[in-house]
Structure formats: structure tokens, C-alpha cells
Image: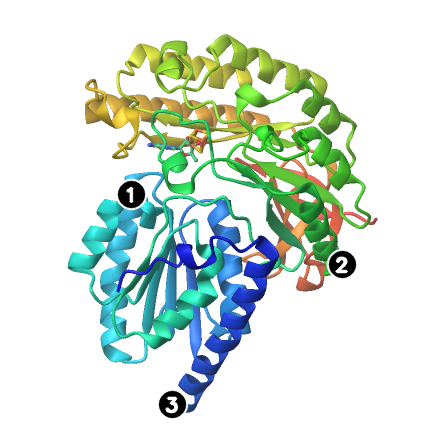
Amino acid sequence: MEKNTKQITEKLNGAEETKRQFLFMEKAKEYVALLEQELGRKPTCCVTTFGCQMNARDSEKLAGILELTGYVLVDDEDADFVIYNTCTVRDNANQRVYGRLGHLNSLKKKNPHKKIALCGCMMQEPSVIEKIKKSYRFVDLIFGTHNIYKFAELLVAMFENETMIIDIWDDTDQIVEDLPVERKYPFKSGINIMFGCNNFCSYCIVPYVRGRERSRNPKDIIHEIERLVADGVVEIMLLGQNVNSYGKNLKEPMSFAQLLKEIEKIEGLERIRFMTSHPKDLSDELIQVMKESKKICRHLHLPLQAGSTRILTAMNRRYTKEQYLALAEKIRKEIPDIALTTDIIVGFPGETLEDVEETIEVIKKVQYENAFTFIYSKRTGTPAAAMENQVPEEVVKEGFDKVLQTVQETARMRVALLQGQTLDALVEEVNEQDPTLVTGRLSNNTIVHFKGGKELIGQIVPVYLKECYGFYYLGEIMNK
Ligand code: 5AD
Ligand code: SF4
């Protein structure tokens, strides 16, 4: 059954829509209670996330609604309800979903009550929906990125129909506030400050699947953070595809730097992070606010993508190699203890090994603390996918290996510079390999493991950085 819930609520404002969704949650609760009677136990659910921090945050919203309707959250895909929150930024993300769906089907054959749902970026692609309709008939519910706030309503529709429910919208200007959220960590949280992207980098599918840029109202953001802090959160991560263009489309425009200044004032909040910055929009005002801040973490993720100006132009990145280098140099000069990380794509159409040498030159000059290196993935519908000069696999591989090696060398060198210092770490978890250790994160995002117990989780403690092991440290907790 193809559904379009958009017409029904188009005229409702955000607050009315929130109320409406809570009514659906009540209705869903009744169905979950019936299921509980039938099963003789609480029904379980599992939310699996693919992709970025935005998706991770969306998954917390899905989990919040599922929990409120009476499901018990588990990590096991054997659960009675499984939802995949998908990513489509590179093709391997799509392939992983198809691969795992086969396994879900075999689990469903053993559990007649099992329901399977798919949502997120990949579902915004018409070819994906066609494929699922044809080859994955056992899926019960599919929706996209624009109507995730209607999850409760869609759950009800799923309970009331035997056939596959599909509800995908092309866009939305709606931002619905105050729906339930189930956080993964009690002490830290992501917060959306904006949705969508207007940049249309020529390789990237995000603007097509996440829609146009929309900023949340600063008051709503501040209230959400205040509530989180009252609930024990000490670190927040402000999320947006391009946070540096925050506020441009608000009724009363506001810059990202101004928003940060307001957030800084929130008492009890200890650390502020944000992701992602587009170099073309990173202002001097932001550098100044970061420099003066006591709470903004010493970490900036500044995607380079490529070092050659020719390739950057073809990518529609709207900066040159020289402009990027000048910006990185300015940031390092103004905030010397900052860690710079980046994203790099190798193998964009027309990229030669000479171009890759320019990327390597930038890596050596900037000396990133960490870099995520990706092989270019052709995304149908993007301008780059139609370019004729796609790079042969062997050439891509050669360039990729060189880039990766350079990144690792410079990152090791940079991270090692902290040795012997005592810095604050927010303790995040008990170490997975060695339960006598806990794992903490420095302001500059470096990981440190040190002796300690789970009572330290959520605390910020000074740690002596004793030994560097490439990208992380072994340390010792110091007295406060
Ligand atoms: N191929 C490879 N990498 C991509 N990214 C975005 N689109 C593609 C693509 N088509 C990378 C960019 C971006 C990161 C989130 O994913 O480096 O910054
Ligand atoms: Fe994609 Fe570019 Fe937007 Fe980032 S800024 S989401 S790479 S289009």
C-alpha cells in the first residue's frame, strides 16, 4: 500500500503536529499491548543505524517513540520489530543494507510476529524503492528522511495493514519539535541545529535525499540543550551538514558564531562540539568565538575533499587549494591547541595521480590529527555521475593507498605531540577489551584509556598522557 500522509498534515503547524503524533503513539501503545498478550512477554525492538551522526540522532528519536509505545529496546536483530536507518552517501552503504536484509528475512520466517522497517537516506532514492518492492517483499514499512517525525503514525498504519506500507516525500519545510528521544549516552547528546544541504557538491547525493537547508529556531535549540543538561548531559554535538551556514534562512537571521555564544551561556553544560564545517563558510567570527570559548572543544572537522583546485572546481566546492591552506593556517595560528580533521575523496572523475599529489601536499602542510579517506562512489543523479572521465580502478587504488599512508604518518606525528601533558577527558565507557580500563575523550577528540571503573562514566577528569599508540593514548588519572 502506497501512502501519502503529507496531504493530511500539510496545513498543521509544528506544535499541532507534535500533539497529533502523540495521539498516534497512544494508538500504537494499544497494538503493542495486544502483541504483548499474544507473545506472553514484552515485545522487543532493535534500531540499527548506518551512516553519520545525523542518522545516529534520528535513530534516538525512533528509539524514543518505540520505547514509549511499549517496546523493549535490544541490540539483537532477532527482535520483534527491526528498523534499519539507512545511509546512501556511498554505494557500499547500500550494499550492506541489501546484504543484511537477507538475514532479516530468515529471522522473520522463524518469528511470524516480526516486523521489518526501513527508513533514512537510501529510501529517498526511487530505484531503491523499486528494488525493495520487487526483491524484498517481506519488508513491512518504508519511509524516508522528510517524514521521520510521523514514525508513530506509520507504526499504526503498519499494525493496521497486512501489505507493505511505503511513504516517501520529496521534501518538507516542516520541523516538528518535542517528540520523545531515547539517548544512547546519558552524558552526551547530538542536537540537530539544521537539516538538509544547499551546496550541491557535484559528487554528493545528500542534497537530493535530505532536501534544502532549514535551520531550527535558536530558542528551540537552547531549550532542548537546557533540558538535556538538566537530565545529566555535559557534552553536546551540534549537528548539520554545513553548520557554518546556520541561521541564514531564519526569519531573524543569526550566525552560527552567535548561536554558539548563546549556547556557551548555558550553565552546567561543559563541552560543545559541532559537525560539519564547510571551509567556504567558515568565518573569522567563528574562529574568534572558538578561541575565546571555555566550552567549545578544540576540534574542527574541516572537509578538504581534494587538494587540486581543478578538482575542487569540478566538485563545486567553491574554494581553492590556496584558500583552504590559508584558512587552516589561520585556525592553527589563532587556536594552537586545536585538532584539525578532514574528509578526503580519491578518484573523483578526471582526477590524475598528479592531482592526488596535491592532496598529499595539503595533508602534509595541514598535518591533520585524523582524516577519513573515501574512494569516490558514483551516485546516480549527481552531476559527477554523468561525467565521462571516470577514473580506472587501479589508478584510484594507487592514489588512495598513497593518501592513506600520508594521513597515517602525519596523524601519528600530530597525536604524539600531546605526550606528557595532563588534559581533561570525558569518560565515555568501560574499555571493551580490558574492563580494568575506561575510555575517555579529550577536548581535541583524541581517545585515552586509563585505569578506572564505571563510576567515572560521564565525568570529566584530568588524565596524564603517558604513552602514545598511534591514534590513542594510555594514560593515568590525576587527582582533581
Ligand atoms: N563518494 C565518496 N565519498 C563521498 N562523500 C560524499 N559523497 C561521496 C561520494 N559520492 C564523502 C565526503 C563527505 C563525507 C561525509 O562523505 O568526503 O565529506
Ligand atoms: Fe554533500 Fe557538499 Fe552538502 Fe557536504 S556540503 S552534504 S559534501 S553537498
**Dot 3 lies on which element?**
helix
- Above or below, 198 relative to 399: below
The answer for how far apart the CA atoms under marks 2 and 3 are is 39 Å
Q: Residue at horizontal 61%, vertical 57%?
A: 15
Give the labeled residue for mark 2. 230
Q: Is residue 292 left or right of residue 391?
A: right
- Above or below, 356 relative to 250: above
Q: Quadrant of the N terminus?
A: bottom left
In the rendered image, residue 5, in percent from the top left (x then y), is placed at 39, 59
Q: Residues within 10 Å of mark 3 (few under 14, many from 20)?
A: few
The answer for how far apart the CA atoms under marks 1 and 3 are is 39 Å
Give the labeled residue for mark 1. 92
Q: Which quadrant of the frame does ligand 2 lie within?
A: top left
Q: Residue at horizontal 70%, vertical 50%?
A: 225
Inspect the image, locate mark 2, and give the three-letter code of the amino acid beneath it. Answer: Ala
In the rendered image, residue 56, in percent from the top left (x then y), is placed at 49, 52
Q: Residues within 10 Å of mark 1 (few under 14, many from 20)?
A: few
Q: Which mark is residue 440?
A: none
Give the labeled residue for mark 3. 38
* Mark 2 touches mark 3? (CB < 8 Å): no
Residue 474 in sight here: no
In the rendered image, residue 148, in percent from the top left (x then y), is placed at 45, 55
